[in-house]
Image (cartoon, grey):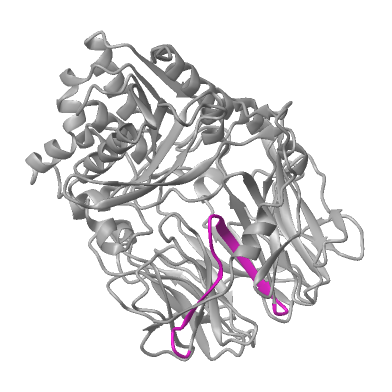
């Protein structure tokens, strides 16, 4: 493996060139969540002259986000708004000849999102599908005559009788999934849509979900991801299949590794297929997604950079087919790299204290979505080895506010392991004196704190809190062994790593030991429960979408296959289940005032986990509160709820944290 660095200083300078803020600029508050515009992923036009994207903004009257489609010239000189309906539009794609822009929307009162076509020459968008279950995904054929669509099977019984609800009948291993709800036997399959005749034909069938279709350059075949060979509910294993682009064709299996393959895409000449291949572990989450290639006709896959021990995003071919582009999770950074197909040589194109989270290439032009700790995500063009900004959707808001200073932070855990993180200083506070500090824990657990923008953290810093975010063992970005370190040993090494960071912050005079808080969401909420059951050093805690009594989650959440593989069924390994649930079984040790929160419809980490811990503390008269957001899943989507959540974080910390020590 060879690294070929390209200068990153120029790229950092471009991203940091947001409007300068004066000392009079105001601090960020939770309500600023209503002001942020979320910029969607870029799509470069076939001629390379335009980039299409979505912009999502809050509609306060409807208390929801509304997404519209825009495009900007490659040279940045012109920006056009293409849609302005009362419903959101998403997933814009160019037809191969550039004549049409397609998108997905539930306009005109449709119960499900349908596919729409908009002629660039002008006119109104036209709805071209009427699928009962809507469009989940789609891809244009290279000649623009057809579109492959991913859609779920029709519920024929519900369609036949819409006057009354029917019982939910479950007869599969995985009963529910967050966002999808209860799962029946229906599956997602591929359909071929003829643009000229507007006719639809089913392409794949069977008891498996087919997804992620991609066309061969000659338009004859479609590669896709499926788990047709096994009970996919019981395993995260998936393989690649290829099918001729005609009704009645039989899919052929391309891969058969014990891990997973997904996100396949043909090379520009059609000779190769690049895709993501997982490393084999009993629980693939702890493995490393890597880019591999194989001959399009079939053959043995080859991992491009086997020594690159970092998670890699879905591959994007360069125009000449000599390399693929990918984004890494790399120790707080999210760089864009190019990996050569011939020898696996790695060139870092964009690196540094920023986060690339989307990339698209067409006509040998590369567009990216990039943010840093002070700048919300915007679109950029990659010109040689430097970034050129294309969008400025948040500049007006950004000019009004101040952001806090962020820096690298590291600590040595009890067994000598170094853990890395990011420290955000309390806005306007005296950095020479210890300050109130909240340890904010990321979810996952296989994820990382990086240099991207997160308004919630800025609101905490603006309220006078140092925010310490650590990538404990189990996090991504430090190699697979680091990720696997917590396998079947939850709330062990992570707690040691997090407390080592707190100790280091106190030792260095950054954190005031008498004014410490802790919080997190999802696995961050789980670890918050573990920490307050381990120590009484925190004056306030916030546990969002967490759980502690994991036996009660078995069959109640969406992770049965992980439980069976990692812990074994509870009746076969009760001591291990009790060990990882120690926050609940040690609840009598908890003295920290704790705010529990979650979505009422969360099937990822059901609200019962928060209810149980809330009652455990309430029974012992430990100050506590439970906040349940109606209609919300694992993430909080309703804008007013998002503002309420962060406001409550700050209020809870303020209420239970002692006043600052007087200056000696």
> What is the x, y in percent for residue 247?
58, 78
Q: Inspect the magenta stretch and tell me whether residue 347 lies in it.
A: yes
Q: Is residue 112 visible?
A: no
> What is the x, y in percent for residue 646?
52, 26
The structure residue drawn at horizontal position 79% and vertical position 77%, both measured from the top left corner, is: 47
The region drawn magenta spans 342-364
Please tell me whether residue 656 is drawn above or below residue 512 in the rendered image: above
The image quadrant where one finds the N terminus is bottom left
Name, please, the residue furthest toward the front.
Answer: 664
Q: Inspect the magenta stretch and tell me whether residue 290 lies in it.
A: no
Please tell me whether residue 656 is drawn above or below residue 582 in the rendered image: above
> What is the x, y in percent for residue 402?
65, 34
The structure residue drawn at horizontal position 33% and vertical position 40%, both measured from the top left corner, is: 557
The image quadrant where one finds the C terminus is top left
Instruction: Locate residue 435 relative to residue 579 in the image: left or right.
Output: right
Q: Is residue 384 visible?
A: yes
> What is the x, y in percent for residue 502?
31, 35
Which one is in front, 236 or 548?
Answer: 548
Which one is in front, 338 or 643?
Answer: 338
The structure residue drawn at horizontal position 22% and vertical position 36%, both measured from the top left corner, is: 550
């Amino acid at each position: 493996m060879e690294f070929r660095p390209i200068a990153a200083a120029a790229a950092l300078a471009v991203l940091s060139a947001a409007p300068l803020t004066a000392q009079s600029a105001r601090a960020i508050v939770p309500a600023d969540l209503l002001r942020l515009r979320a910029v969607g992923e870029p799509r470069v036009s076939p001629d390379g002259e335009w980039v299409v994207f979505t912009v999502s903004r809050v509609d306060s009257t409807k208390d929801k986000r509304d997404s519209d489609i825009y495009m900007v010239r490659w040279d940045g000189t012109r920006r056009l708004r293409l849609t302005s309906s009362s419903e959101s539009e998403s997933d814009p794609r160019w037809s191969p000849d550039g004549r049409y822009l397609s998108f997905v929307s539930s306009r005109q009162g449709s119960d499900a999102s349908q596919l729409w076509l908009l002629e660039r020459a002008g006119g109104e968008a036209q709805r071209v599908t009427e699928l009962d279950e809507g469009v989940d995904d789609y891809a244009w054929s290279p000649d623009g005559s057809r579109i492959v669509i991913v859609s779920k099977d029709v519920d024929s019984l519900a369609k036949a009788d819409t006057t009354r609800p029917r019982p939910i009948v479950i007869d599969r291993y995985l009963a529910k999934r967050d966002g999808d709800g209860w799962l029946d036997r229906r599956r997602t399959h591929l359909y071929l849509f003829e643009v000229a005749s507007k006719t639809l034909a089913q392409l794949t069938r069977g008891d498996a979900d087919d997804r992620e279709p991609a066309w061969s350059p000659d338009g004859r075949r479609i590669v896709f991801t499926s788990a047709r060979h096994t009970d996919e509910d019981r395993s995260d294993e998936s393989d690649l299949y290829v099918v001729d682009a005609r009704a009645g064709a039989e899919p052929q299996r391309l891969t058969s590794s014990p891990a997973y393959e997904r996100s396949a895409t043909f090379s520009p000449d059609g000779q190769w297929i690049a895709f993501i291949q997982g490393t084999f572990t009993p629980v693939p989450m702890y493995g490393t997604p890597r880019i591999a290639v194989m001959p399009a006709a079939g053959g043995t896959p080859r991992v491009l950079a086997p020594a690159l021990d970092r998670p890699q995003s879905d591959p994007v071919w360069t125009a000449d087919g000599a390399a693929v582009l990918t984004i890494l999770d790399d120790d707080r950074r999210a760089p864009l790299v190019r990996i050569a197909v011939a020898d696996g040589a790695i060139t870092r194109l964009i690196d540094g204290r920023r986060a690339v989270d989307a990339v698209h290439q067409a006509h040998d032009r590369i567009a990216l979505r990039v943010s840093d700790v002070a700048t919300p995500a915007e679109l950029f063009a990659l010109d040689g080895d430097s970034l050129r900004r294309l969008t400025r959707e948040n500049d007006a808001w950004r000019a009004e506010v101040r952001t806090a200073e962020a820096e690298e932070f590291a600590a040595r855990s009890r067994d000598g392991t170094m853990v890395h993180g990011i420290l955000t200083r309390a806005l306007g506070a005296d950095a020479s004196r210890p300050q109130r500090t909240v340890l904010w824990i990321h979810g996952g657990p296989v994820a990382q704190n990086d240099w991207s923008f997160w308004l919630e953290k800025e609101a905490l810093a603006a309220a006078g809190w140092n925010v310490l975010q650590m990538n404990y063992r189990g996090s991504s970005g430090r190699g697979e062994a680091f990720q696997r370190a917590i396998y079947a040993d939850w709330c062990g090494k992570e707690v040691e790593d997090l407390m080592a960071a707190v100790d280091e912050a106190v030792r260095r005079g950054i954190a005031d030991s008498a004014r410490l808080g802790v919080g997190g969401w999802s696995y961050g909420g789980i670890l918050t429960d573990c920490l307050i059951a381990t120590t009484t050093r925190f004056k306030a805690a916030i546990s969002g979408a967490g759980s502690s009594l994991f036996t009660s989650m078995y069959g109640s959440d969406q992770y049965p296959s992980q439980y069976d593989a990692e812990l074994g069924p509870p009746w076969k390994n009760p001591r291990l289940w009790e060990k990882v649930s120690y926050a609940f079984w040690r609840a009598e040790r908890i003295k920290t005032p704790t705010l529990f929160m979650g979505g009422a419809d969360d099937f990822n980490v059901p609200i019962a986990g928060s209810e149980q811990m809330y009652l455990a503390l309430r029974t012992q008269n430990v100050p506590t509160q439970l906040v349940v957001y109606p209609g919300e899943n694992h993430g909080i989507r309703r804008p007013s709820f998002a503002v309420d959540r962060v406001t409550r974080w700050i209020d809870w910390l303020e209420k239970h944290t002692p006043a600052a020590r007087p200056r000696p």
